[in-house]
Image: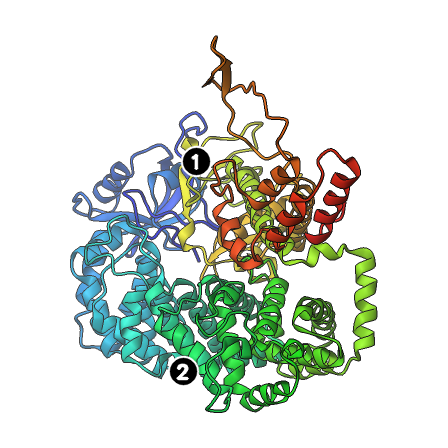
Amino acid sequence: MPSTLSRTVSSATTPTLSTTSTHHRPNASRTRTRTLTVSISYKTQKVDNYPLVTNAKLNDVVRDLCVNHFGVRFREGDFCLRVVETEELLTEEKLRRRLTDHTPLHLCQSPPLLARHLLNSLSSYDANTLKRTLFLLQKYLKEEEFTDEFLSRGGLASLQDLIITGQGNMLAYGLGCVHALVEGREVEFNDAFISTLVSIIVKQNLVNICRPATAIIIHLVLPTSSPSTSTPQNRYGFDIVNRAISSQTSFLPTLVHRLSGTDYLLQLNSMHLINSLFRHVTDHARREFIDMLDALDIRGVVVRLLQSSPAEELKTQIVEFQRLMVLEGHQRRRIVVNPINIEHRRLLSNLWELAKFPDDVALDWTLLGFTETASTYPVRDLSRAGFLGLQLMHGYAVRHNDAYTTLFRTQAAKPPAARCPFARACIEVCNILCDYWGISTGYSTASSYSPLLLLYPQVFAITLRLFFNLWDELQGADGEDVARVASLIRSQFKHCVGVVEKSTAGGLEVLDAFEKEMIEVPLEVIRERQLKELESEDDGMNKLPIRNLRERHYRLAYATIRDQLLETLMKGAWFPIPREKGRSKNTMRFYRLGSNHKSLHYGDFPRMEDRRPGVEELAEKVDLSLITSLLPYHRSSTLQSLKPSKLPSTFAFVPSHCFSLSSLDTPIADFICSTKEAWREWTDGFSMLLDKGVSQETAAMVQTLTDVRVKVALLDITGENIDLNTTNVAMNVDGTATLSGNDLAFYYDTGTNPILSLIEIGNGTGSDGRSELTSFEEERYSEAGTSVFGTDLDEINEVGESVDDDDDDDVDGFFDYVEEVVGIGS
């Protein structure tokens, strides 16, 4: 079935794109005139062997048929020709390029006349007439001329009324009609109809009703593609749907409940709709929406869904949900904890209250493990984990309150320096989880699901428990050993997640296996494994400043690979398309991504050429805002129906090198790649453009590039190649300097202390004392301490001032000292 390509229909015929239908750009130089012999029927009459010239005007052909063959009164715009087998409307372009000898055609009502006729039938009181009319409408509403006439005469209002009151097949056909409409253009729906859609999702269980209703809501959730959003016709976006959802309190509970059911199609539709709402939720509604999903235990439901070994389509939706959870965690981690915020202040106060200290103990944040005193809120400590870290702390204190209060009672008997700092332990554990699952960067390249990621509040609690256990086992541990324990936790966590997720298929039992693997391993085993890891990895790479550096360069590496792949798509490539009647054996299609990355342009050519056609030569295009997923060969209906014999004889067909762009699992554009490399470039290019998961090869490439960038950055960490503002220094006759130009001629005072200059560079300040750090570095500056390297520079300054500049050994010793304290080897 052809699929509509653009939500906003232009004056041209709405293009459809699949391996079974194609559109060509008119070009007289490529098309030769032919005379075809066809049969044409009208009602009970038939004309055989009618000579049809391919470059003739269709209006003239219809006039000739009416007047000279069928004896019908001809009126402009009353008749058209359609292909008998497919009911496809014959246009002049199809006549020139696709029609073949002996194709049976029939003369019938034109699309506008047919639209008026079917619209009149919608007023019928006969149920059978209504069903038949709605069934036909699903097909004809994909034709622009028909749709224009239908909408101009109030057809949409009639459809909405029928759906609001309809039942059974009538309701299913009516929803199919509206689905065909929203795929092609933006139309105005009234609030009663949108509320009916939400109600249908809640109350109906039949797949042929729920599926089109779900597809319509997903289209409504998408932000409008029109630049003018002030008119009532642009009724698209999350807020439009959310008003109806708010009046149906059972809407989200119903979707989540269906995930636990046994009907696969209902599971798939529900997961798809949840993801669409999650992806497009607006900022002011986000918190309420996420909290409602959490209250319904959506994570646990999805993890249990994994136990049923879902099919590939559902797996794709689960991975997409996982990716959205990573993005949500990243956004919360970036929120700075602010005591002015009522909710932030409430969570902090609850942390103190839930600890249940004696009444005579005054508020003191250090008792909870923060470094800040009672005079201020512990904002600086929490800047390393953001609002996400505060939520995880508070969640642990609520769900594990006995362990929470017991911890402080047992720690009270120890000297202050030997007490386990709960808050700092939580921050370290939070960062370990965020670094491992990409929450720190917000970029998830995972192509498979991770049940432990979906259960990260429980994983956080188990990992925190291990932190407490290791702290107790390290008898000499004090407040300065948090980083040492955290490094052990990081090693153990990475090992356990890898082992558990490989050995379990999914489901909640993975949590039990993770807890056993984490908790029941002796300290000696963890230490031994960590030592082996340290033999092959520099310990400095795990330090906070380096992790922050890596996080930044991961984003840059991801952006670099993305830009390269999009550049490949913008250059375009040739792809074969199946051979059909009237189509050249070697017909090829050229795809090219538009410069604005919003449209995919394409055109068909008789054969592959030794050039790349420009965008102006590609008349057709796909609106990428409609694309929801990439379908592999085994999930694409058009690719599976493809016969390799229909492809050019010189082309080797490999199913694994094929994929389709789809809108709601309906193929829109098909790609038959010649090599695996071409398949990877185009699938990963589209995946990055649509913010989806990429292949393992590209994910590894991003990681490799990140490693290289980090190592190069570390080689330059002393600031030797820091960019300086350069100006000319022209010496005047009187010995004063005049600054001009871009070249620098300078002199310096030999009394300048090179050690203090180094400290200025390390401190990120210039001669005027102003910070030269980027905004990202300034953000991390507060997280790491008083310097980018997390080192106390006051101490370095004090030592540096005592160094004798004339003593080379003294200077070399100071440099060794600086390298040691900032954790960077020479």
Residue annotated with mark 1: 618
Within the image, what quadrant is residue 182 found in?
Answer: bottom left
Contact between marks 1 and 2 (CB within 8 A): the answer is no
Residue annotated with mark 2: 253
Q: Nearer the viewer, residue 586 or 95?
A: 586
Provide the secondary structure element on which disc 1 rests: loop
Of the numbered discs 1 and 2, the one sitting upstream in the chain is: 2
54 displayed left or right of 329: left
Closest to the camera, between mark 1 and mark 2, is: 2
- The tag on residue 707 is none
- Rendering coords of residue 237 (x, y %): 31, 61
Name the outermost residue toward the top.
733
Q: Amino acid at mark 1?
A: Leu
449 displayed left or right of 199: right
Q: Residue at x 52, y 86 (%)?
A: 399
Within the image, what quadrant is residue 458 found in?
Answer: bottom right
Q: Residue at x 60, y 26 (%)?
A: 749
Provide the secondary structure element on which disc 2 rests: helix
Q: Which scheme is used to colour this image of the protein?
A: rainbow
419 displayed left or right of 816: left
Residue 295 vertical position relative to residue 238 in the rendered view, above or below: below
Q: Nearer the viewer, residue 481 or 164?
A: 481
Residue 259 visible in the displayed image: yes
Q: Residues within 10 Å of mark 2 (few under 14, many from 20)?
A: some
- Rendering coords of residue 548 (x, y %): 59, 54
Q: Nearer the viewer, residue 457 or 524?
A: 524
Within the image, what quadrant is residue 270 found in?
Answer: bottom left
CA separation in Å, label 1 and label 2? 47 Å
Residue 207 visible in the displayed image: no
Q: Amino acid at mark 2?
A: Pro
Q: Residues within 10 Å of mark 1 (few under 14, many from 20)?
A: many
How many labels were placed on the picture? Answer: 2
